[in-house]
Image (spheres, rainbow, N blue to C red):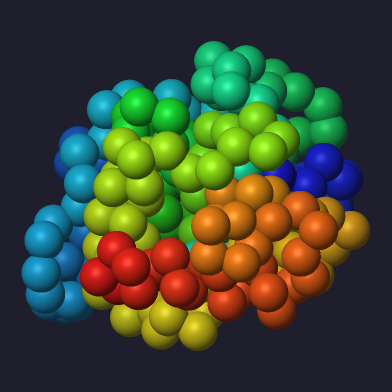
Amino acid sequence: MTNLTPNAGPHDAAFDAPHVCAGCDNAEAAAHAAGAGSGPGKPTVNRWEPTSHHSSRNGQDIDHIVVHYTTSRNIEGTISHFKHGSPQTSAHYLIGRDGALVQMVGDGERAWHAGNALMNARSIGIEHVAAVGDRIAEQQARTSAALIGWLMREYKIPKSQVIPHICVPRNTDCCGDLFAEFGGGVKAGAEAQRKALHDWMSSMGL
């Protein structure tokens, strides 16, 4: 769950998402031009729902992926919150239970998802539509694995730096029960949630 705290957004004093092609912003274009990664391309973005809830990375490299869950199955409500809600929060990507991929902030911009200014500046935030107690759905898992795999290749992010939100750390149990089958869950600590996420990734070939 994206942290609903003021320091996740414009109140961060320490610190533009135009696309240059479909589903590809300036940071992605630069990575393509540099020949980053090899393997399948970026999974299809089914919807582009831009939000003004973002800010500059100020030159910070992308070197983490933070995995979240929404605490609700209402994808439209989450999209609306990331556009109009207060305090202002957002994520780069939102993955529906049916596997639909929504992008709301370009990779080159800082989304306000982690409740931590530095982590926001250096990470991609991925929200998974799920209610409390929900495990990751089959189609959702396929899209998530494809997206995470592409991001890891594109930005040279090691598996050790793909983390659940609880590891930022914040006062959160996010990413909930998405990976409870692998030993995670709302009652698990940060390290158990991290291991569960990584075991799920291994099961998906990542």
Q: Quadrant of residue 46?
A: top left
Residue sitting at x 25%, y 70%: 205
Q: Quadrant of residue 137?
A: top left
Q: Is residue 35 left or right of residue 85?
A: left
Percent x, y of residue 125: 54, 53
Is 91 above or below relative to 168? above
Residue sitting at x 54%, y 43%: 135
Percent x, y of residue 198: 48, 74
Percent x, y of residue 78: 61, 24
Residue sitting at x 76%, y 53%: 186
Q: Quadrant of residue 58?
A: bottom right
Closer to the camera in the image, 10 or 157: 157
Q: Is residue 190 visible?
A: yes
Q: Is residue 127 left or right of residue 103?
A: right
Is 134 above or below relative to 142? above
Is 187 above or below relative to 14? above
Q: Is residue 95 left or right of residue 133?
A: left
Percent x, y of residue 133: 68, 38
Q: Quadrant of the C terminus?
A: bottom left
